[in-house]
Amino acid sequence: MKERAMVPEADFRSYYGRPVVRPPVWRHDIAAYLFTGGLAAGSALLAAGGDATGRPALRRAGRTTALGALIASTYFLINDLGRPSRFHHMLRVAKPTSPMSTGTWILSAFGGAAGAAAVAEAAPLLPGPLRRPVTVLGTAGQYGAAALAPALATYTAVLLADTATPSWHAAYPDLPLIFAGSALASGAGVGLIAAPPAQTGPARRMAVLGAALELYGAHRVETSKGILSEPYTTGRAGRLLRAGRTLTALGVAGALLGRRSRVVSALSGASLLAAALATRFGIFDGGVASAKDPRYTIVPQRERLAGSSG
């Protein structure tokens, strides 16, 4: 006769029904900040590539979008902080061990460089004596922003992974790949929308590279983290990440097949931008979902304990 268990199966509820790990207090302003920061970084790289290869339409689109996306990023960050003074206070110190402190300084330095590059687009309207200095300063700012772009695109991935949020923390090797790829793809999308097909060669190459990094990283977080991959494949996060994959594939296909069509190029660019937005929000929502469910804290802890005792 089978012995009956006297203790019911654990259902992973915590004291008073509260999560074991406190969910992030960030609102969706931070998810939007993740997207616009990546867009600013990708656009800065697009501008540098366009300038280096003699494609003025790419340069203009990259410079203006980098500054616009940076302004949007600053707004979303300050709106989440609650008061503009809090952003200013973070600049009082530089703490290399803090992703938030480091990111604030990266954002500020990038802003100065991107601003100089965008202003230089108005150089032809200036009087002769001012035209050349502004152009030179803009070129320096453009390449300065491009040099800072990889850090701007990926520091937010480090910021998320540095928290105790289970699915973000578990994905620390892969989030930088996703964020870097998403930044490249969104920058490429800007170029495909704004430039004539004859000038979009660098943008198409950026799209392919960015899509490869993003899709590989997303596949890793959705399949290689055990139970901590679940929040990225279910619910709102799962829907967003699946939509991001589909839109990325469509965007790359359009970029490669629509080399001579302005309409197809623009549609593929819009698809890449929408994919980047869906991916950033999906990663954000997946982490929040993992913090709200005690299973994603308790089960991995038990597995680690079982492994160490074995």
Image (tube, grey):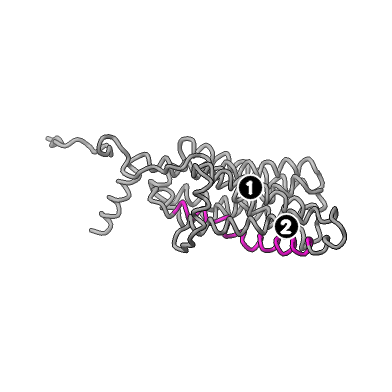
Mark seen at residue 104: none
> Sequence order check: which comes first, mark 2 or mark 1?
1
The Cα–Cα distance between marks 2 and 1, rounded to whole angstroms, is 14 Å
Where residue 28 appears, x then y in whole percent? 51, 39
Q: Image quadrant of residue 8? A: top left
Q: Taking 296 as reference, is 58 left or right?
A: right
Q: Which residue is mark 1?
A: 71
Which residue is at a point 31% across and 46% down the rendered structure image?
Answer: 299
Disc 1 is placed on an element classified as: helix
Instruction: Say whether residue 167 is visible.
Output: yes
The residue range painted magenta reads 134-161
Placement of 34 over or under 150, stated as above or below = above
Quadrant the N terminus occupies: top left
Q: Residue furthest right?
A: 128
For image coordinates 64% across by 51% down, the residue present is 40
Q: Residues within 10 Å of mark 1 (few under 14, many from 20)?
A: some
Q: Nearer the viewer, residue 22 or 4?
A: 22
Of helix, strand and loop, which one carries label 2? helix
Amino acid of disc 2: Ala
Q: Which mark is residue 117?
A: 2
- Give the percent coordinates (x, y) of residue 22: 35, 43
In the figure, is residue 188 to the left or right of 37?
A: right
At a point 13% along the width and 37% down the height, the residue shown is 3
Task: Name the image quarter holding the C terminus.
Answer: bottom left
Q: The residue under label 1 is which amino acid type? A: Ile
Question: Where is residue 281 shown, x and y percent of the image?
Answer: 53, 42
| Residue 279 at least partly seen | no
Q: How many marks?
A: 2
Say few, some or many: other residues with alpha carbon within 10 Å of mark 2 (under 14 / 14 to 19 / 20 or more).
many
